[in-house]
Amino acid sequence: MSHAQKIEIVAPRSKHYQGPFGRIAPGLAGWRPDGVSDDHLKDYFKDFTANFMTEAPGKTPGQISSDETIRTDLDNRFDSDLPAGYTYFGQFIDHDITFDPTGLTSRRLDPNGLLNFRTPRLDLDSVYGRGPADQPYLYSGDRDALLTGSIDGTQRPDLPRIANATAIIGDMRNDENAIVAQLQLAFLLAHNRLVRKARELHYDQPFEEARRVLQWLYQWVVWHDFVGRITNAAIHEHAFRLDNHPGGHGEWVLGYPGVYNWKHQPYMPVEFSVAAYRFGHSMVRNSYQTNVGPEAGFGVFIPIFDTTANPPDDLRGFRGLSERRVVQWDWFLQMSSSSGPFPQHTRKIDTKLANALAFLPENADEPASIDNVLAARNLLRGVSYDLPSGPDLARYFGLEPLELDDDDIPALWYYLLKEAQTEGGGSRLGSLGSLIVCATFAGLLKGDGNSFCNRHPRWRPENEPLLAIDGITQDPGAWTLATIIRLSGLPVDGASFGNGN
């Protein structure tokens, strides 16, 4: 791998440090379509995405029927081998490490002048906020536990909400759809269970111990379970590994320090945040089966967007949960109780987006607005940030560029989806995508002085007293996203809905 160099690791300067954006390839020129002026970029990308990036090319929202949408969800040709829950875990992680409120524009932006409004660490600040001293309204009276709520008239938990259904959480983006909201809820409940365990063990600081353990478990799951699933295995193994020196404490070593590097402070690479990490958009399904209960039931698909009903009967967020929208987790993650067609899978990581994402209900007053076309927005944002082309970035890191078809464009986000489709069969990122994603996550973990990699390099979840809880793992050593769900106590199977089948 070219461009390797020695780096100086510097932890964030303060507990709640917010870092800048930056580039991993600052010397490369940005790509933009030849002969297309700034005034015509929006139309160019809308035309391109309508023809090449949807399941129903050329159709308007009114021409894509709900039956047609559901048929694609029943057609396993669109499926990857990744359980559907990882689509939304990826979204949850994104909200933990990056937030760029910059509006959509064709104007060129300098990432070095933009502030990332999230700490560049896997520290769950979207869950804990600024802590109980600064944001006490996120916490219970004793400030050890996090606040939770319940679904009206039931014992089922929900996010804590005020009268207008606004969630009281560390990052409002984690309420933007019902599935990521329930992942947020899982972390709230998991923390509270760890607090109870810490009290049972008579720890002096139950809140601090519970937060530490949940953060470390989360970091472990992000690296070993999530990043390990969605990237090339060889690149993942090389990117970050424990070097066990005989008689020493061990050290986690970066395998690609020349890819994601800093001198004084960590930054969020725009090649990652604006392109590589947006692979999750192609994984979203049009609709999901949520649970086996009487209000949903086997075979009932709930769309992510339903613009025909008022109020909408879909999985959009910013409102309280209902029984129909409660996630039965063995339908979204591989668990011992998963059977038949479950867990549902993500769509393939490829250059086709679900019908539902082809026409978003973001700007109802202007249906033709680019605000409603997710793929076009991603491509326009890439141009505004002067992102290099995929082939140029591949060559920069010594990789053989993917051969594109005449109908393709070399825009970095599109190129990485095409690479995943070609090299990873739609279930993994390709070489360049894996390199960017693995190097960035490894760098974030290595740069955080409070991560388990630095505080306790040989830490493993099975050796943590607070995690000695029966039933939270199903296989020895298997610490995955499903572990956090079981730790939280959220419903995992049909028995949770009064149906043992």
Image (tube, rainbow, N blue to C red):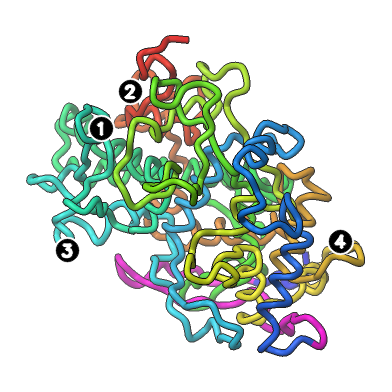
Circle 4: element type:
loop
User: For the residues marked 4 and 2, what is the alpha-carbon distance in whole angstroms?
Assistant: 47 Å
**Mark nearer the N terminus (1 vs 2):** 1
Q: In the image, which residues are magenta?
A: 6-35
Residue matched to label 2:
469
User: In percent of the image, x 55 and y 77: which residue is there?
Assistant: 22
User: For the residues marked 1 and 2, what is the alpha-carbon distance in whole angstroms?
Assistant: 10 Å
Residue matched to label 4:
402
User: In percent of the image, x 52 and y 38: which residue is there?
Assistant: 85
At label 1, counting other C-alpha atoms closer than 10 Å, the crowd grade (few under 14, some 14-19, many 20 or more) is many
Residue matched to label 3:
134
What main secondary structure does the magenta stretch of the protein show?
loop
Three-letter amino acid code of the residue under disc 3: Asp
**Mark nearer the N terminus (1 vs 3):** 3
Three-letter amino acid code of the residue under disc 4: Leu
User: For the residues marked 1 and 3, what is the alpha-carbon distance in whole angstroms?
Assistant: 23 Å
Q: Residue furthest top?
A: 500
Quadrant showing the N terminus: bottom right
Residue matched to label 1:
193
Q: Are marks 1 and 2 in contact (CB under 8 Å)?
A: yes
Three-letter amino acid code of the residue under disc 2: Ile
